[in-house]
Amino acid sequence: MMYIRKLLSCSTVLSLLVFLLLPQFTFATNNFSYNLEVSKVNPTVGDQITVVVNGNNLTDVHAYELDLAYDPSLLQYVSGSKVNDSGFTNSEAKANGHIKFLHTELGDTNIEDGTVSLATLTFDVIKKGSASIQLISVEPTNSQDEATLQTVNVNKSIEIADKSNPGTGSGGGGGGGGIISPSNPNTDKEGKHVVTLEELSKPAENGKVIVPVSADMKQVALPSNTAELLGLNQLEIKMDQLTLDVPVALIKQLTSGVSADTLKDSMISLKFEPLSASAATDALAKGQAESQAAIKLGSDVYEFELSLIKSDGSTIAVLSKFDQPITIRLKVDASINPKLAGIYYIADDGKLEFIGGQYSNGEMTAQISHFSKYAVLEVTKAFADVPNGHWAADVIKELVAKQIVNGTSATTFEPGRSVTRAEFTSLLVRALKLTGTGQLSFTDVHATDWYEETIAIAVKAGVVNGKSETIFDPNAQITREEMVTMMMRAYAIVHGSQSTGNVGTSFTDEAEVSTWAVQFVNQAAELHLVQGRSAGVFDPKGITTRAEAAQVIYNVLMK
């Protein structure tokens, strides 16, 4: 860490403005406290505001460094200074909305004790929304060149209103005029791309009307008759880091039930606001705490909203759940391992939900059925009983990252533990994302059992049968021939039947395979989806382990 060394005299300041590295020491800062004062907590777009950083109960402070964060999508940093500055001051805007502010007194002068204005920061207000200024840390240095880093986390909230815009209503945070006419220019203003009738009337490409949007936009404003203009085509909003494919049926869902008169005076707002660096860091920290896994961010964290807005800025409708999914494509950071990454939904409490992730050409693609916060995340979960040298280590890591399999505790996977019929059935249903339950006739599967729904789904899909018409035996340990039979039925759902299974295998114990399982075992062997437990031995009645179950699930999905 670079500290500003005390300068010896005013006469040497012009020739000795040199920053030197100092060793880190500690001095008494227990009584120090800090606060922020904002000139306007409710500014409007176009205003200029100042933020004053105050230090309280200061003693023997000769120099200091401040680290602050702000939202650069809403505020533009102009400058920083110190009131009654008698020393040397330097402020600089860093990446990701951070400001480094440094000050040192000259000669033997110390900063005045007590309450002192440490910095005055000036910002231009550029967009409507909820912003915050955060003082993250202060590093004071005393007259003995001893420095102590203090983490303070002092926040000041700012609610920014939009300028009045006669005839079109408010913009930025969701307002905007009604149906956009051909005469209205396509203006990218305050982070909003206004889509014209000409753009929506372009010839479709592969069933999509593509609207290119510049990288600095945070919202697309569409005319309320967009569904009519698209016809049978999808709408594709294409940006450098983000692409959204919106079905026309979804736009109809948003506007259904709204009167024609109301629609004339409204617009469709599609927002895709990237979280600030501090908010993204907080969300990631919550996710790591909740999942107890190492998480790496592979894209911006976007918060999405699809709504219908009147020209006065009031919201008519917000679409929270989709009848048809939106396809989302996010550019992935080159440092991310695609096998351990995917698009995740990030809940406010930090809970992560794996949505999907087909990786191709540096992009991750998935379908989402509701809007909120989404990002590409690389998730790495380590288990004490699955060392890197374990034969199933890579498969387990990948399936855990995709939330298909879980550990038996926060630190253990128990790869050698047996698997029940109910457990393996649930694994297959979760891996294949099967839905649609049917009526069960099994007397040993009850509505209160945790596995009742997944068994009902698997039976309806034809993946699994009971041991009889009335018995499923959910808690019985699943055998290898049962596992392979279920696997091949699931494989046919995902890939279609690609083998007859009539070709004989090299398993020396094929005669021990049950008649109902022979075709499935041979088919799996022919497709190299399953191996024997030893040379030429399949062991059909052997009990399946958790590691074997993970490998089988992986084979169904990946091979």
Image: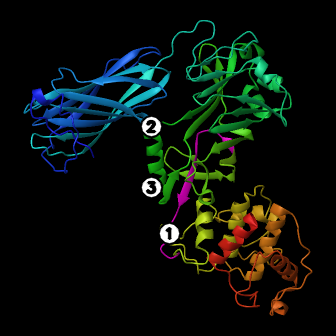
Which comes sooner in the sequence, label 3 or label 2? 2
Q: Secondary structure at mark 1?
A: loop
Q: In the rendered structure, which amino acid carries the disc numbered 3?
A: Ala
Q: Are marks 3 and 2 in contact (CB under 8 Å)?
A: no
Q: Quadrant of residue 9?
A: top left
- Residue 289 is labelled as 3
Q: CA distance from mark 3 to mark 1?
A: 15 Å
Q: In the rendered structure, which amino acid carries the disc numbered 1?
A: Ser
Tell me residue 142's x, y (percent).
Answer: 12, 40
Q: Which residue is mark 1?
A: 409
Which comes sooner in the sequence, label 2 or label 1? 2
Tell me residue 31's x, y (percent).
Answer: 14, 40
Magenta span covers which residues? 368-386
Mark 2 vs mark 1: in front: 2
- Residue 96 is labelled as 2
Question: Residue 467 colored magenta?
Answer: no
Tell me residue 361's x, y (percent).
Answer: 69, 49
Tell me residue 534's x, y (percent).
Answer: 70, 90
